[in-house]
Amino acid sequence: MIQDTSLQTTSNQTKSKDRIADFGEVYTSPREVNAMLDLVKQETERIESRFLEPACGNGNFLIEVLTRKLTKIASRYSKSRLEYERYAISAIGSLYGIDILEDNVLECRNRLYNFFATQYTDLFGSFSDNNLPNTVKYILDRNIVWGDALTLQTVGDSPRPIVFSEWSLIMDGKVKRRDFTFSELLFQSENNSLPLFSDAQEDVFIPQPEKEFPPVHYLKIWDMEN
């Protein structure tokens, strides 16, 4: 059956025009994304390097970073399901995004999850444990935030300060989580003589978390607050 898509096309165009006017929403093509990421190519392929996209849209930048990271992980650990899982969790936990539009946030989370799931099942056939998808979804729910990077607040009925979780891979497949308020990270960075990030192996200041969690196995991350 042939569907009449004229109304759908018109609706999408109108939605896009409205969003450009209201939110300055612009999508960057994969070619442009990769050209910019190539400027920091070494960091995009370093598994633990962290990336924050403060206007992430539906994830065009973040999906390309994840692609590079998972490609690197597969080249090293495709023979070991356990090692692949551990480092994939580290890579996914290193990506952060903020967007003011809720549908963008949901689509971004889904794109990142579905890409990981496809790469994983292509290598290993199926998930080793049902808790692995739960863990990835939990991390993405925390890392990709429906918020306003200008006000540093979440968006919705009850705005609150944006909080990001740091996920650090430690021994025996365990992960250490520390939560940081985004506003405090920026405030400390602006009022400290040392930078928050450095690509030149220089000294940086170490912010203090607002909350820390005991280390847990990566397959139990999704249940760590219960």
Image (cartoon, rainbow, N blue to C red):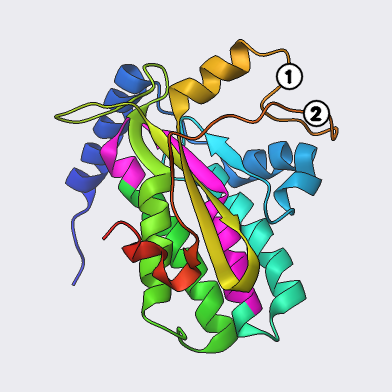
User: In terms of image quadrants, where is residue 189?
Assistant: top right
Left or right relative to 45: residue 105: left
Q: Vertical placement of 85 versus 26: above or below?
A: below
Q: Position of residue 110 (x, y in %)?
A: 37, 58
Separation of disc 1 and disc 2 at Cα?
7 Å
Q: Quadrant of the C terminus?
A: bottom left
Q: Vertical placement of 135 versus 45: above or below?
A: below
Query: Is residue 91 magenta-colored?
Result: yes
Query: Is residue 131 magenta-colored?
Result: no
Q: Position of residue 36 (x, y in %)?
A: 70, 36
Label pair 1/2, CB-CB below 8 angstroms: yes
Left or right relative to 116: residue 142: left
Q: Which residues are magenta?
A: 83-105
Q: Which residue is more in the foreground, 125 or 171?
A: 171
Report the amino acid beneath label 2.
Asp
Question: Which numbered circle lies on residue 50?
Answer: none
User: Of label 1 and label 2, which has the lower sequence position?
Assistant: 1
Furthest residue toward bottom: 125
User: In terms of image quadrants, where is residue 194?
Assistant: top right
User: In terms of image quadrants, where is residue 101?
Assistant: top left
Circle 2 residue: 203
Circle 1 residue: 194
